[in-house]
Image (cartoon, rainbow, N blue to C red):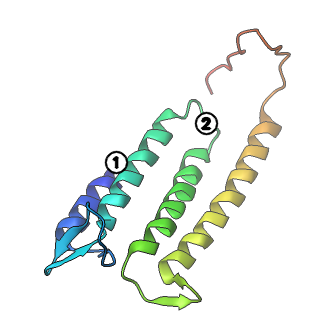
Amino acid sequence: AGFAVAMFGAYLHGLFRGKATGVPWGVEIFGEQHHPTQIYLLIAFLGIYLILRGQRDPAPGIPILTFLLLHAVSRFTVEFFVESPVVLGPLTLAQIASGVAALVAIAGLLVATRRFQATTPETEWRPGEPPVERPPA
């Protein structure tokens, strides 16, 4: 939720200025309509917050890695609408950094999930039965 508040501040300060556009929800900056990329990120971060709040009893490390992955994907996507110079083909520096962060998060999620599955005792659960609750750690 803190990142969402930060994006409201970025909007007021003019950071992450969007490309010129004709969409009806564009914001006027110096007499020209621009994508409200700060608002796009605000909405994305509120969605990330809701996803993280919805996790029930996640394995250790999963929430932060999930946040990192969703943040990277959101920033990579919104960066297409930001006035930023391209540095590698059609990609900006922020998109390259977001891509690297997403790959690191995916690798971390795979490792964390495998570790959690390896340390979780197997139970005899059958479909149609209530799940067996683990004792608190």
Which amino acid type is shown beneath numbered disc 1? Ala
Residue 69, image quadrant:
bottom right
Q: Nearer the viewer, residue 106 or 81?
A: 81
Expressed as whole percent of the image width and height from the top left, the position of residue 12 reads 17, 66
Would you say 81 lies left or right of 55 here?
A: left
Q: Is residue 65 above or below residue 31?
A: above
Residue bearing mark 2: 58
Q: Nearer the viewer, residue 40 or 66?
A: 40
Whichever of callouts 2 and 1 sits on the residue coming sooner in the sequence is 1
Cα gap from disc 2 to disc 1, whole angstroms? 19 Å
Number of dots carrying numbers = 2
- Considering the image in quadrants, where does the C terminus appear? top right
Q: Nearer the viewer, residue 136 or 33?
A: 33
Expressed as whole percent of the image width and height from the top left, the position of residue 127 reads 80, 14
Q: Residue at x 49, y 59 (%)?
A: 71
Q: Secondary structure at mark 1?
A: loop
Q: Residue at x 55, y 84 (%)?
A: 90
Q: Residue at x 72, y 60 (%)?
A: 107
Residue bearing mark 1: 1
Expressed as whole percent of the image width and height from the top left, the position of residue 86 reads 49, 88
Q: Is residue 91 above or below residue 3?
A: below
Expressed as whole percent of the image width and height from the top left, the position of residue 94 reads 48, 77
Which residue is most to the top?
A: 129
Would you say 127 lies left or right of 63 here?
A: right
Q: Is residue 86 above or below residue 35?
A: below
Which amino acid type is shown beneath numbered disc 2? Pro
Q: Secondary structure at mark 2?
A: loop
Q: Residue at x 40, y 73 (%)?
A: 81
Q: Nearer the viewer, residue 35 or 3?
A: 35
Residue 133, image quadrant:
top right
Which residue is most to the left?
A: 31
